[in-house]
Structure formats: structure tokens, C-alpha cells
Image (cartoon, grey):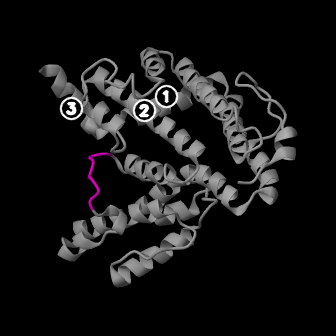
Amino acid sequence: MAKYYATVAGLPNIAVEDRKLPFTSPQFLEELRPILSQADGKLFDLLLWEQENHFLLDYLEDSEAAKTDEAQPTLFSYDNLDAIMAVYREKRTVPRMAGLPPYFQTFMAEKLAEKALGEENDQHAQNVQSEEEEGRERLPISDEDRLAMYYYEYAMQCGNEFLEEWFGLNLHIKNILAAITCRKLGWNPINYIVGTGEIENKLRTSRSRDFDLSEDFSAMSSLLAVGEETDITKRERQLDVLRWEWLEESVFNRVFSIERLLCYYLELTIIERWVNLDERTGEETFRHIVKTLKHESAESLEEFKRNQKK
């Protein structure tokens, strides 16, 4: 494992309450790239792939519109996806494409098979699935959540303990808050909980206040308090402080390691989010986050109304 003594020693101190940045997270990563080992560079790429997920969703919804949109992917090109589509149409199988993570291709194979079933009701299309999909439990969640689930499954097997735990933390935060929201509104959590682990299964089935997770997840009491916060800005701020404290604790004894650089990058992104948002914009952004979390679709609202009548 590479050590980055000079780089870490030269990093300006930053704190969660800071509102001025020594540099942006992209600038920081650009400066790091030349000195990172190939393996360590891929760890930063893993963090960036989460931002690329929506480009795949946009492409599958309307490929032509996605290609002309001002915002474009940075880790892949739509030409990669066009190549997959072309081979799929010819051979009804999804090829392995260099440069695309396996979870991207798993999701794409699944969506293309669904499309074939919908258009042709072809029995052959039912068998078009990658090896990763075989035996996978089919959860009734949205495409966005399904892609996120595949991403987290992929990221949590990256081989770096720090990042695996970081992704696990964020997955549990998202799911616990989703479960709290479902409980408040009378929605079925099976439609909103992402993943198939022990914690996820408890969130789907437990009726206890803490979902029987206090012994499994140390931040459970903090998240229950966050779930009761009605001020959206305060709620998101509390979550970022929780994440920051976890980051600092996790790298306390990893001073000159790649984990310290990953931590610094993640802390920069936390500060950036608050620096770049004034109060009004921040409120709108956080409302969008909550809206996404709650999946306020017509179907969900109808389910809520039906539960209210019981």
C-alpha cells in the first residue's frame, strides 16, 4: 500500500464548519492523479461512479436527448452504451465492455431484457441475463434505487476496508431514513429499502421503534433523532456532521495512507455542498432530496390514502 507522507503533511486543515475552501474537490483530485498508484486511482474513480449513474438512466430513457444534454458523463461516453445496444440487437446478449463497471452492465442487461419482453414477449429474452443476475432477489423498487443497489453492492466489494465501510454507512443512512418515512406515512417499506442484507431485512419487517438495530448499527439513536427533525436544512446538516465524525474517527490511525486522502476528498465534498448553496437554494435542493427519498409518485400517494381509510 502506497504511503503519501509529503502530500498528507502539506494538506491545509479543514473543519466541518468551514465556509472557505483551499481548493475544490476536483482540483484536489487533479493534483493527486499524477502521484496516485493505479490501484489507488481506481478507488477515487469508484467514488466518482456514483455521480455517473444518472447518465445511464437518462440514456436508457431517451438516448438522443441524453447525448444532446449540456451535462455529459466524465468516466464513460455514450458511444460505449451505443456499442452495447448494437451488439445486443444483433446477438441478444450484452457484451463485456472495457471501462464500464460490472454493475453498469448488469443493470443494462436487465433493462434491455425487460424491454425485449415488453415488446416481443419473447421467451428467449427471459434468459438474457448476466451471471451476476442469476439467483438475485427481485425487489419492487424503482430503477433509480435498483441501480443504486447494484452500485453499493459493487462498491462494498472494492477490497478497501475504509471505502467499503463508508459505502455501508451511507447505504444504511439512506435506508433507515426511508424506513422512518415509510412508517410515518404508512407506506410499505419493501418498495423503498435498497439492498438485501440483515439490516435491510430488519428495516422491512421490524415493528420496534429502533427496527431492532441499536445493537447492529451504532449511529441508530442519532438517525432516529434526525428522522424526527422537521427542518430540512438542519436535518441534512446533522447527517453531514455524522458522516464527518465517522470519517475523522475512521482515519485517525491512518495518517499517511490513501485512506487519509480519500477522507480529505470526501470532507471537501461535504463542505462544498454547503459553500455552493445559499439558504434558498439549499432548501430547494434538500426538498428535492426528501421528495426522491419518499418516492412521491401517484401510486405511493394512492397507497397512503388507502391505508388512511383502514
Q: Which residue is identified by label 2?
A: 291
Q: Position of residue 125 (x, y in %)?
A: 25, 73
Crowding at dot 1, Cα within 10 Å, few <14 / some 14-19 / many 20+, comes out as: some
> Residue 287 — which label?
1
- In contact (CB < 8 Å): disc 2 and disc 1: yes
The quarter of the picture where residue 52 lies is bottom right
Q: Amino acid at mark 2?
A: Lys
Q: Is residue 137 magenta?
A: yes
Decide if residue 96 is on the left or right side of residue 305: right
Q: Nearer the viewer, residue 63 or 146?
A: 146
Residue 23: image quadrant is top right
Answer whether residue 297 is visible to the viewer in this image. Answer: no
Near-viewer residue (198 or 285) = 198
- Label 3 element class: helix
What residue would you read off at disc 3?
Answer: 303
The amino acid type of the residue labelled 3 equals: Glu
Span colored in magenta: 135-141
Query: Is 200 on the left-hand or right-hand side of 147?
Result: left
Which residue is found at the position 84% from the left and 45% from the top? 5
Report the amino acid beneath label 1. Answer: Arg
Residue 203 lies, in percent from the top left, at 31, 31
Q: Residue at x 58, y 50 (%)?
A: 160
Q: State how far apart marks 3 and 2 are (Cα).
A: 16 Å
Where is 155 relative to 87, above or below? above
Q: What is the CA distance from the residue labelled 2 to the residue labelled 1? A: 6 Å
- Between the residue at mark 1 and the residue at mark 3, the CA separation in whole angstroms equals 22 Å
Q: From the image, which quarter does the N terminus lie in?
A: bottom right
Residue 272, by quadrant, is top right
Please tell me whether residue 283 is drawn above or below residue 9 in the rendered image: above
Between 249 and 231, the one nearer to me in the picture: 249
